[in-house]
Image (cartoon, rainbow, N blue to C red):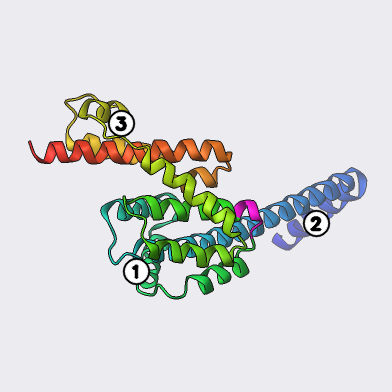
C-alpha cells in the first residue's frame, strides 16, 4: 500500500510540473541559484576584506612598536595609544592577543623598519594617499611624547623611503606635528573637565570611561579608517592631544586628593 502511495505522489508531482508548474520550477531554481551566487560572492569579499584588515593591523602595529620603543622606553601615552588601537581594530580577542604579541616582538628590533615597511606594501599594496594616512598615524606616535628624539626621526625616514614619501613630504609631516606640540598650553583643571565633558565631581571610573569614549572617537587611526579629509584629521589630532592632556590632569588631581 505504501508503495502505491509513493507512486501516486510521484505522478501528481509530474502532472503539476508538466502542466503549469514548469515555469515556476525554473524560476524558483534560477532565483535560488542567483541568491546562492550572491551569498557566495559576499562571503568571499568579506573574507578578503577581513584578511586585508588583519594584514594592515599587523604591519601598523609592528611599525608603531619600533617608533614607540626607539628612545628606549614606552611611555604611558604611547601604551595608551596602542591599547586604543588594539581595542578599536582587533576583530576579536584572539586577534588582539596576536597583535599585542606582535607589538612586543617588533619593539625589540629597531633596525628593520625599512624592511618591515617594504613588506607592508607588498602584502597590502596601498595608493599614495592611503600611505600618507598610515604615515600620519606613525608620525603622531613619534610626537605623542614631549621629546621627538633623533632615533624616532631616523625610523620615520626609513619608513618614508619604503613608502616612497619624499624628504620634503616627510619634513612637512614633522613640521605640522611639531607645530601642534609647541603651540600647546598648560590647561587648568576646570578646562580639563570641560574638554572631557564631565562634571567637576566625577570619580576616577567615570573619568576613565569618558576618556576611552572620546579617545576612540578622535583617535587618528579611527579617523583614517573613516577616510576623513586631511584637515579633519589635523583637527582630530589636536582634539585627541587635548583629551590626553585633560585626562592626565584630572587623573593626577584625583590620585593626589
Report the Cα–Cα distance between label 1 and label 3: 31 Å
Label 1: state its secondary structure.
Answer: helix
Asked which quadrant contains residue 19, the reply is: top right
Please give the name of the residue rendered at 26% of the width and 38% of the height, measured from the top-left corner. Answer: 247
Residue 129 lies in magenta, yes or no? yes
Q: Which residue is mark 3?
A: 196
Quadrant of the image containing the C terminus: top left
Looking at the picture, tell me which residue is in the foreground, 49 or 73: 73
Image coordinates for residue 64, horizontal then vertical, percent: 42, 61
Furthest toward the right, the residue is 19
- Find residue 41 and report its image quarter: bottom right
Residue bearing the label numbered 2: 10
Label 2: how many Cα within 10 Å (few below 14, some 14–19, many 20+) = few
Q: Which mark is residue 104?
A: 1
For residue 244, say whether it is visible: yes
Image position of 52 with respect to 242: above or below: below
The numbered mark at residue 244 is none
- Residue count near mark 1 (Cα–Cα under 10 Å), binned few <14, some 14–19, many ≥20: some
Question: Percent x, y for residue 131?
Answer: 59, 56
Which residue is at the far left?
257
Residues drawn in magenta = 126-130
Amino acid at each position: 500500500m505504501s508503495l502505491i502511495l509513493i507512486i501516486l505522489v510521484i505522478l501528481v508531482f509530474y502532472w503539476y510540473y508538466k502542466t503549469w508548474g514548469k515555469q515556476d520550477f525554473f524560476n524558483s531554481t534560477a532565483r535560488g541559484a542567483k541568491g546562492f551566487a550572491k551569498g557566495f560572492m559576499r562571503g568571499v569579499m568579506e573574507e578578503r576584506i577581513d584578511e586585508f584588515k588583519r594584514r594592515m593591523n599587523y604591519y601598523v602595529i609592528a611599525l608603531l612598536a619600533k617608533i614607540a620603543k626607539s628612545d628606549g622606553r614606552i611611555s604611558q601615552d604611547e601604551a595608551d595609544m596602542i591599547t586604543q588601537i588594539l581595542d578599536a581594530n582587533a576583530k576579536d580577542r584572539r586577534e588582539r592577543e596576536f597583535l599585542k604579541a606582535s607589538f612586543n616582538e617588533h619593539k625589540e628590533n629597531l633596525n628593520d623598519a625599512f624592511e618591515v615597511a617594504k613588506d607592508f606594501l607588498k602584502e597590502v599594496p596601498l595608493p599614495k594617499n592611503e600611505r600618507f594616512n598610515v604615515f600620519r598615524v606613525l608620525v603622531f606616535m613619534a610626537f605623542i611624547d614631549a621629546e621627538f628624539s633623533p632615533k624616532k626621526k631616523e625610523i620615520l625616514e626609513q619608513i618614508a623611503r619604503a613608502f616612497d614619501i619624499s624628504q620634503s613630504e616627510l619634513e612637512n609631516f614633522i613640521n605640522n606635528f611639531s607645530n601642534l606640540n609647541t603651540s600647546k598650553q598648560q590647561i587648568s583643571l576646570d578646562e580639563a573637565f570641560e574638554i572631557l565633558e564631565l562634571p567637576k565631581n566625577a570619580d576616577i571610573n567615570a573619568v576613565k570611561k569618558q576618556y576611552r569614549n572620546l579617545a576612540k572617537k578622535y583617535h587618528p587611526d579611527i579617523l583614517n579608517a573613516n577616510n576623513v579629509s586631511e584637515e579633519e584629521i589635523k583637527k582630530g589630532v589636536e582634539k585627541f592631544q587635548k583629551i590626553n592632556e585633560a585626562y592626565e590632569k584630572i587623573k593626577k588631581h584625583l590620585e593626589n586628593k
